[in-house]
Amino acid sequence: MSTDNNDDLRARYEAAFMPNYGVPPLALARGEGATVWDVDGNAYLDLIAGIAVSSLGHGHPALVRAVAEQAAALAHTSNLFLQEPEVRLAETLVELAGGDARVFLTSSGTEANECALKLAIKYGKTHGRSSFVATENGFHGRSMGALSLTGKKAIREPFGPFAIDVRFVPYGDAAALEAAVTEDCAALFLEPTQGEGGVVPPPDGYFAAARRVCDATGALFVADEIQSGIGRTGTWFAFQHDDARPDVLTLAKGLGGGLPVGACLAFGEHGGIFAKGDHGSTYGGNPVAAAAALAVLATVDKDGLLANATRVGDALAAGIAAITHPLLAGVRGRGLWRGVVLTEAAAPAVEAAARAAGFLVNAVQPDVIRLAPPLTLTAEQAQTFVDALPAILDTALDTALHAAKEH
Ligand SMILES: *Cc1c(COP(=O)(O)O)cnc(C)c1O
């Protein structure tokens, strides 16, 4: 086993990898529950969970057992053969989402959205519809189809032009949706809360308004719940808060608890849009990934993690909201998915100060810190962060003032 420390591994990473991520600040070695350790032996409370992925925390016995047993029994079949774990996973997802749906399984979020996009393109072709609507600052993935729907200009525009015509509307504006989603629109792609945009919840009623405008015009309503799904906001899916079921639902991130698995569900007649041969994936439905997802779903249910996300998430937000600090503007979001909003663009400094204090958080926007911890986070663990936050903000403010002086 390598005995390299953080600095050694960072240097090797920088030399071996393409520079698209920059060099991450830490090399992690192991985790247990909501705690991770770096290769130098430092412990951190993990409040980002690999970007809302490690929903059961690290090393959860149910996930470890399911993965180990499935890997030993049968690790892969491809779609040339079926296996029970993928069947059970598809059945369970359909049931949790309210029934009457069909599923395509993937290995990532962007692939789940590619599936949704191909469904929508085929739907559009058979109904004389060719335009798409998505939101400014929205995020749907990095592959070329999903990227064409991604509203963040800095990551989309260098790779255009794209094969589909997308109208971008301001997020949270129901009137703008009504104006943009017309009779020639094949599909609307929408996040229930913008995740990469900075954990931005829309005004109440926005998702229901999206459902209505799609019903009125015949456009497909695609809900991208890749980040919001599987309990993150305290319900299995965020659309359940608004009782506005989409036509197509995409999932990934928290579904596999750390194993790569995504899903695209199409409801009602839309479940039959693809004909034989229309789509495929070698790894999609992989039995080890499916077993992991089944362990996540069973544990969320058995251990009451939906209620835990609401209870601990509310306590975390209330604790942060009660802090008065010149760098802190407020906190938004739902369940264990929160954006800590700063009064200036100091998020990287806050992220670094939090790390130095033993907390992993994410500077998702220049002025927003994202918290998306394991759904198993306890109220006591959340409180340790609330207690540490004023000093973290002090340190970040010092860094920001210092940087301002040097300029
Ligand atoms: C992360 C994310 C994606 C992309 O998922 P990958 O697994 O990174 O491909 C798409 N949509 C949303 C809302 C996401 O948060």
Image (cartoon, rainbow, N blue to C red):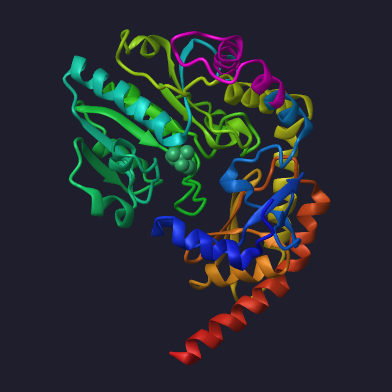
Q: Is residue 249 visible?
A: yes
The residue sitting at the front extreme is: 1
Q: Position of residue 175 (x, y in %)?
A: 32, 42
* Magenta region, main secondary structure: helix
Q: Residue at x 45, y 13 (%)?
A: 79
Q: Considering depth in this image, is 134 or 174 the residue closer to the camera?
A: 134
Query: For residue 67, which quarter of the picture?
Result: top right
> Total marks drawn?
0
Q: Considering depth in this image, is 96 or 2 the residue closer to the camera?
A: 2
Q: Position of residue 144 (x, y in %)?
A: 29, 39
Query: Which residues, given as a range, are shown in magenta?
Result: 68-94
Q: Is residue 219 visible?
A: no
Q: Is residue 403 placed above or below 9 in the rendered structure?
A: below
Q: Position of residue 281 (x, y in %)?
A: 40, 22
User: Is 341 situated left or right of 314 in this image?
Assistant: left
The residue sitting at the right extreme is: 380
User: Is 397 situated left or right of 316 in this image?
Assistant: left
Q: Considering depth in this image, is 19 or 380 the residue closer to the camera?
A: 19
User: Is 119 situated left or right of 22 in this image?
Assistant: left
Q: Magenta includes 28?
A: no
Q: Residue at x 79, y 57 (%)?
A: 383
Q: Is residue 93 placed above or below 26 in the rendered structure?
A: above
Q: Residue at x 47, y 66 (%)?
A: 366
Q: Quadrant of the C terminus?
A: bottom left
Q: Considering depth in this image, is 137 or 283 the residue closer to the camera?
A: 283
Q: Residue at x 49, y 10 (%)?
A: 100
Q: Position of residue 276 (x, y in %)?
A: 32, 8
